[in-house]
Image: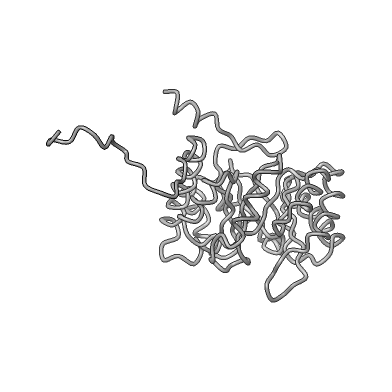
């Protein structure tokens, strides 16, 4: 009972908003017909949405497939500067009726790495306007501290380049952020397998954002369910406290009392 109570009371908190699920699902790479199944199997309570998918009257179509209890997280995909990100965020708030925004400022077209400094500028401006700002960033401790001070609700460091499915290439730097920043650290981009999501959660990540790994799988709803279970397992292991790592062997039973004794 105590264990279940601990898990039930374990919430992801973003600027005072509480979520039970620690799985943030992307919607950018699969058909509308599969969004509902993915969200339901993932148990996701937050769904990202690129503004370009909400243009031309498509927003109503997307919402037809998204469960009503899911929070929309518009992103500023396509922004190359802070000013562009701010304009997109303001428009997204009007269209989606959501104060949540994921800041993406990317000028590098080859590796799609975030511009941390323009991201910081956008975060400062939007936080002052009452947005729940969730910035996608390269895991740099000083930038993470500045984002916190600017009013970010969390930091979202990349595990690997967007869409690569390479996993936790930046694990050591993400762990520094987890240890040093008093904000939720949500691992975003590059997570390719449920086992990698579990590893990030065991490290102390607050949540996982995933899209490509699910969208490119053979069975999207089943992969979404696998990620859900892996994230829950990793979080439970983190809360339990992982066992100590030893260089040598350590017997699990006393090495005395053999039959010949």
Q: Residue at x 65, y 45 (%)?
A: 178
Name the image colouring: one colour
Across the whole image, how many numbered discs are drawn on residues? 0
Image coordinates for residue 68, horizontal then vertical, percent: 58, 43
The furthest residue to the left:
260
Quarter of the picture containing the N terminus is top left
Q: Residue at x 68, y 72 (%)?
A: 111
Quarter of the picture containing the C terminus is top left
Q: Nearer the viewer, residue 77 or 232?
A: 232
Left/right of residue 25 with respect to residue 91 in the rendered view: left
Position above or below: 202 against 61: above
Q: Nearer the viewer, residue 157 or 216?
A: 157
The furthest residue to the front:
261
Left/right of residue 81 with respect to residue 67 in the rendered view: right
Left/right of residue 180 with respect to residue 21 in the rendered view: right
Q: Residue at x 83, y 45 (%)?
A: 150
The furthest residue to the bottom:
110
């Amino acid at each position: 009972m105590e264990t279940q109570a601990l898990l039930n009371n374990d919430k992801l908190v973003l600027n005072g908003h509480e979520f039970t699920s620690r799985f943030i699902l992307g919607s950018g790479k699969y058909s509308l017909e599969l969004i509902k199944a993915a969200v339901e199997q993932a148990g996701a309570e937050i769904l990202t949405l690129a503004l370009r998918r909400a243009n031309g009257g498509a927003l109503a179509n997307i919402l037809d497939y998204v469960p009503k209890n899911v929070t929309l997280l518009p992103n500023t995909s396509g922004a190359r500067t802070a000013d562009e990100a701010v304009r997109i965020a303001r428009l997204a708030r009007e269209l989606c009726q959501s104060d949540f925004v994921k800041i993406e400022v990317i000028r590098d077209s080859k590796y799609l790495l975030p511009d941390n400094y323009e991201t910081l500028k956008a975060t400062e401006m939007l936080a002052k306007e009452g947005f729940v700002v969730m910035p996608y960033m390269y895991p740099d401790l000083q930038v993470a501290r500045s984002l916190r001070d600017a009013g970010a609700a969390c930091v979202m460091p990349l595990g690997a380049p967007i869409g690569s499915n390479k996993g936790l290439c930046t694990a050591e730097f993400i762990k520094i952020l987890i240890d040093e920043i008093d904000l939720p650290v949500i691992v975003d981009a590059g997570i390719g397998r449920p086992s990698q999501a579990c590893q990030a959660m065991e490290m102390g990540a607050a949540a996982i954002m995933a899209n490509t790994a699910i969208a490119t799988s053979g069975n999207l709803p089943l992969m979404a369910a696998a990620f859900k279970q892996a994230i829950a397992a990793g979080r439970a292991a983190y809360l339990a406290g992982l066992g100590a790592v030893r260089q040598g062997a350590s017997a699990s039973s006393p090495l005395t009392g053999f039959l010949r004794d």
